[in-house]
Amino acid sequence: LKILIVEDESLVAFEIASALKRENYTITARVSNAEDAFTSIKEDMPDLVIMDINIDGELNGIKAAEDIIYEHRLPVIFLTAYTDNATIDEAIASAPAAYLIKPFKRQELYAAVSLALSKRIKTSSTPVQLSDECTYIANFSELQKGSTTLSLTKKEKQLLDLLLEYKNELIPFTTIENELWPDKAIEVTTRRTLIHRLRGKIGENSIETKKDQGCILKL
């Protein structure tokens, strides 16, 4: 299993890499900023990203992690020396796989990595046929309908990925809300509007809704 380390403190990055190599993990790279992290992912796709929240560059670790989770569906472990509520709340809102407060022990690191890898979301660049006329390309957040390419919003992609994970099964509305909006309560109309928009893009008959229960992606 391959791990990317994004940490601008070189000694900390070295210690993490050394600890993980002892457990037979492969380190794809040690980088200090978001731009280098994005480049590294394109060159050598990891199974997991360990991300310091306070990194060099224009994007902090939280914003970088949001892009990585959205674009590549990779689990991310946050590292931080900050324990204030605002930082923690912002980090949790991006749905990390685990969270480590510096300084941490190796056993805590190993436990976080094991937990994060157990939550891996498997995606493929192989197109998924949603209907006779609609194909989903997960890694590019796109739908192909005939000769037309439709882009999905972040929430539309999250909903479609969730529906695909449990295709042909009823997913309760409460599960959808908890997965897509883990940090806040939403109005019912927000969820309904999202399902309606996605249904309009992939096909009116593709998503079946059961009143007051949930919905099903029918494949």
Image (cartoon, rainbow, N blue to C red):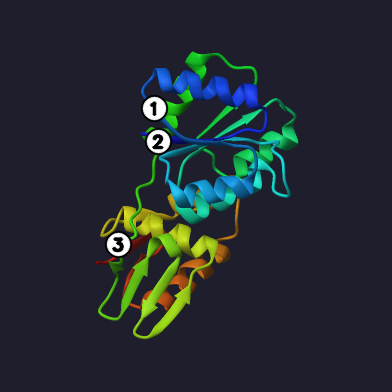
Q: Are marks 1 and 2 in contact (CB under 8 Å)?
A: yes
Q: CA distance from mark 1 to mark 2?
A: 6 Å
First in sequence: mark 3 or mark 1? Answer: 1
Q: CA distance from mark 3 to mark 1?
A: 26 Å
Which image quadrant for residue 148?
bottom left
Instruction: Report the residue at 45% width, 28% height from top.
Output: 113
Instruction: Report the residue at 53% width, 61% height from top.
Output: 154
Q: Are marks 3 and 1 in contact (CB under 8 Å)?
A: no
Compare residues 171 and 39 and report the one nearer the observer: 39
Q: Which amino acid, by three-letter code, is at mark 2?
A: Lys
Compare residues 189 and 204 and report the one nearer the observer: 204
Q: Quick check: 118 above or below 22?
A: below
Instruction: Tell me the quadrant of the picture where the N terminus can be found.
Output: top left
| Disc marking residue 2 | 2
**SS label for mark 1:** loop
> How crowded is the residue under tag 2: few (<14 C-alpha within 10 Å), some, or many (20+)?
some
Q: Which amino acid, by three-letter code, is at mark 1?
A: Tyr
Residue 129 location (% of width, % of height): 27, 70
Residue 165 location (% of width, % of height): 33, 53
| Disc marking residue 126 | 3
Residue 164 location (% of width, % of height): 33, 58
First in sequence: mark 3 or mark 2? Answer: 2
The residue at which mark 1 appears reads as: 25
Compare residues 135 and 21 and report the one nearer the observer: 21
Instruction: Tell me the quadrant of the picture where the C terminus can be found.
Output: bottom left
Instruction: Report the residue at 28% width, 56% height from top.
Output: 169
Give the left or right position of residue 54, taking residue 28 as reference: right
